[in-house]
């Protein structure tokens, strides 16, 4: 991918911790795979590598998705929303996105909502 990212020239709005949420979506199925946090350095690393790199809030370190598991995510498209405070990254995934082994981190369940009321 090798797109240069200069956070001083971007409109992105990071939170008070210098983070921005990133929604990761399958390019092929359009399914949401996961949500993770990025900072300006992980965005720059992701664009340079062409694969997703996140910031782990719990470990306080960079996390190259798939570096240990092999379940990498090749970046196909990188966008930000209308408020510039969230990212949408479309990827070609190489294996499951979730640490549980599920295709998506959103396989845990769903709320049962009665929309008829």
Image (cartoon, grey):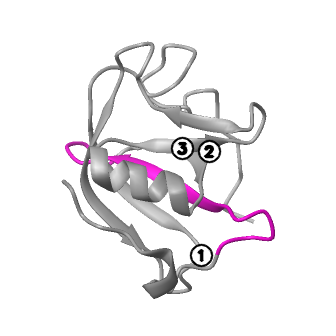
> Quick check: 28 left or right of 12?
left
Q: Alpha carbon of mark 2 to alpha carbon of mark 1: how far?
A: 16 Å
Quarter assignment of residue 116: bottom right
Residue sitting nearer the eye, 78 or 103: 78
Residue 65 placed where, x, y %? 45, 31
Task: Give the secondary structure at mark 1.
Answer: loop
Whether 45 is drawn above or below 5: the answer is above
Given contact means CB atoms under 8 Å apart, are the residues at marks 2 and 3 in contact? yes
Which mark is nearer the camera, 1 or 3? 3
Tell me the crowding category of disc 2: few under 14, some 14 to 19, or many 20 or more residues within 10 angstroms, Cα based: many
Q: Alpha carbon of mark 2 to alpha carbon of mark 3: how far?
A: 4 Å
Residue 100 placed where, x, y %? 57, 15
Q: Which mark is first along the chain, 3 or 1?
A: 3
Q: Which mark is first along the chain, 1 or 2?
A: 2
107 in magenta: no
Whether 78 is drawn above or below 93: the answer is below
Tell me the crowding category of disc 3: few under 14, some 14 to 19, or many 20 or more residues within 10 angstroms, Cα based: many
Residue beneath disc 2: 55
Quarter assignment of residue 28: top left
Residue drawn at x 50%, y 86% is 11
């Amino acid at each position: 991918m090798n797109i240069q990212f200069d956070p001083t020239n971007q409109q992105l709005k990071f939170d008070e911790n210098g983070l921005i949420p990133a929604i990761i979506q399958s390019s092929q199925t359009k399914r949401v795979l996961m949500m993770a946090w990025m900072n300006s350095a992980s965005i720059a690393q992701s664009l340079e590598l062409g694969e997703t790199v996140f910031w782990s809030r719990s470990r306080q370190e960079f996390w190259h998705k798939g570096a240990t598991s092999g379940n990498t995510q090749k970046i196909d498209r990188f966008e930000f929303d209308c408020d510039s405070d969230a990212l949408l990254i479309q990827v070609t995934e190489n294996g499951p996105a979730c640490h549980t082994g599920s295709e998506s981190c959103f396989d845990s369940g769903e709320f049962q909502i009665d929309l008829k009321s």
